[in-house]
Image (tube, rainbow, N blue to C red):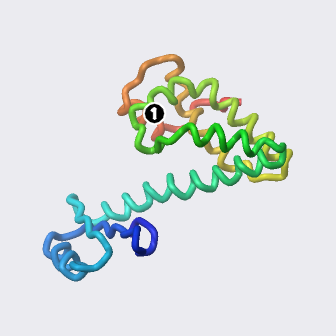
Amino acid sequence: MIGSPPSDSKSPRLYLAGPTEALSAVVQLFAGSVAQTRPLSGGIGKASALKLSYSSYQKASRALAAVAYALASDHGVEAELLDIAQGHTTNYLAETTYFPKVAARSWRWGPEMREAAHALEEAGLPTDLADAAATVMGRWTGLKNTSPDLALVLDELHKGPRCDPS
């Protein structure tokens, strides 16, 4: 299940995976309800993988936004942060063509994330998300100033850490 509880303006999606006969039965069970059923091909595990993939982005990005706002608030620049954020209306998860550019720049973004972690620590805020971003960027160190394709960028994420980008 992905989405907010049903309301006049919201309808959750129920992603389903498994044997075709079972999927058909569940789709029929929810017919006429506010839940949108979305059968997935490929067998058991696909719906769970989708849920966790989406949750890892959606929940973590909101937590990161709260931490970023707290740091800005501690320094009295929250209005400016919101002004910058309101100028960016795209969903980063949907910008998969930008991932290779991020990977190619990670050699300089990783250290910036370590600096952010230090600033968060000084403010008494959690550093884990900034540290994690630096760790991810460390896996892309070998792609410095290249033009990798998306497949290579994703492959590099599966490899062990290259070096600490601090």
Front-lying residue, 40 or 36: 36
Kindly give the residue lying farthest to the left in the view shown.
21
Q: Is residue 5 above or below residue 130?
A: below
Kindly give the residue lying farthest to the front in the view shown.
8
Question: In what element is the residue under mark 1?
Answer: helix
User: In the image, what residue type sits under mark 1?
Assistant: Phe
Circle 1: is it few (<14), some (14-19), or many (20+) Cα within 10 Å?
some
Residue topped by disc 1:
99
Residue 79: x percent and y percent?
73, 44
Residue 40: x percent and y percent?
24, 61
Q: Say whether residue 92 is visible.
A: no
Q: Is residue 166 above or below residue 93?
A: above
Image quadrant holding the C terminus, namely top right
* Residue displayed at 69% across by 50% down: 128
Residue 108: x percent and y percent?
64, 24
* Residue displayed at 28% across by 79% down: 33
Q: Say whether residue 95 is visible.
A: yes
* Residue displayed at 37% across by 59% down: 49
Q: Is residue 31 above or below residue 74?
A: below
Q: Does residue 112 appear to the left or right of 38 in the view shown?
A: right
Residue 73: x percent and y percent?
79, 49
* Residue displayed at 78% across by 45% down: 120
Q: Does residue 163 appear to the left or right of 1 in the view shown?
A: right
